Image (cartoon, helix red, strand yellow):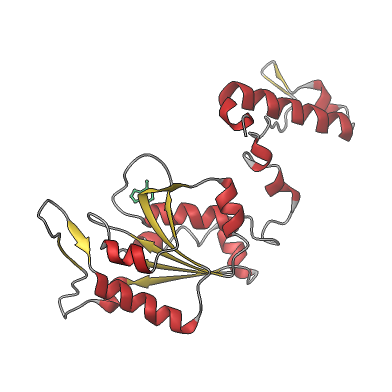
Amino acid sequence: MNIHIITVLPELLESPFQHSIMKRAQEKGLLQVHVHHLRKWAINKHGQVDDYQYGGGAGMVMMCEPLANAIDELQQEKKFDDIIFMTPDGETFNQKTANQLSLKENILIICGHYKGIDQRIRDTYVTKEISIGDFVLSGGELAAAIVVDAIGRIIPGVLNDETSALTDSFQDNLLAPPVYTRPADYKGLKVPDILLQGDPKKVEDWRYEQALLRTQQRRPDLLKD
Ligand code: ADE
């Protein structure tokens, strides 16, 4: 899978994909992340990519021309399955969207800054608008990093133990059950007996019950779907 990201702050996206599972996904050739600096398509030698908003008001707006030229140039090389704009007024990101996006071949993500991007780019190029929650970040980069991480780890073949993504919270609309490791007794706090008995069926049933209980207690809204 190829993920291209357009940003005015490429430095913010240098580290997130260079460690752990994202690193492994790229080493296995299952994920390629390409970060593009929007200033490459600036309208003048000062590197301008934004301007005052029509109608007045505080905050700059990212201009049509640099973004359109960047997207057009990248699209000459490959057709994108989705052109995503990261924005707090987009559809709230969740595991279902991550699952859907993980099956795509080529995705382009645009990170907004300042007051946002000119509406005409949203109207003509963008196919999906994603928010990572009801709060406002200074820019779309950290949000994009979260989306890429959530997608990248579930690309088939990325995780060694294929089942471990299936038992994550939110797969099946359930939160994950509690987990324990050694020692079996930590200062009198004991690991549940059932996990020590070596009966895989009982463990599976216990985990399902715990997942259900935790979801009922913490996120009953998930059980309504
Ligand atoms: N850009 C700024 N805030 C954001 C958010 N909550 N989600 C996605 N992109 C954003």
Residue 77 at least partly seen: yes
Residue sitting at x 44%, y 79%: 75
Q: Position of residue 31 (x, y in %)?
A: 58, 68
Q: In this view, does 211 lie to the left or right of 83?
A: right
- Left or right relative to 7: residue 205: right
30 horizontally vs 52: left or right? right
Quadrant showing the N terminus: bottom right
For image coordinates 57% across by 56% down, the residue present is 151
In the image: residue 202, left or right of residue 149: right
Visible in this render: residue 10?
A: no
- Which of the 4 image quarters holds residue 21? bottom right
Direction top: furthest residue: 188
Q: Give the farthest residue toward the front.
A: 123
Q: To which quarter of the image does residue 195 belong?
A: top right
The front one of 217 and 192 is: 217
Q: Position of residue 89 (x, y in %)?
A: 35, 47
Q: Nearer the viewer, residue 127 or 80?
A: 127
Which quadrant, please, contains the C terminus? top right
For the point 16% across and 54% down, which residue is it? 59
Q: Nearer the viewer, residue 77 or 155?
A: 77
**Total tally of numbered discs in the picture:** 0
> Residue 199, image x and y in percent?
90, 31
Residue drawn at the location 41% of the way across and 52% of the way down: 143
Residue placed most toward the observer, 97 or 41: 97
Residue 81 lies, with reference to residue 168, above or below; the image says below
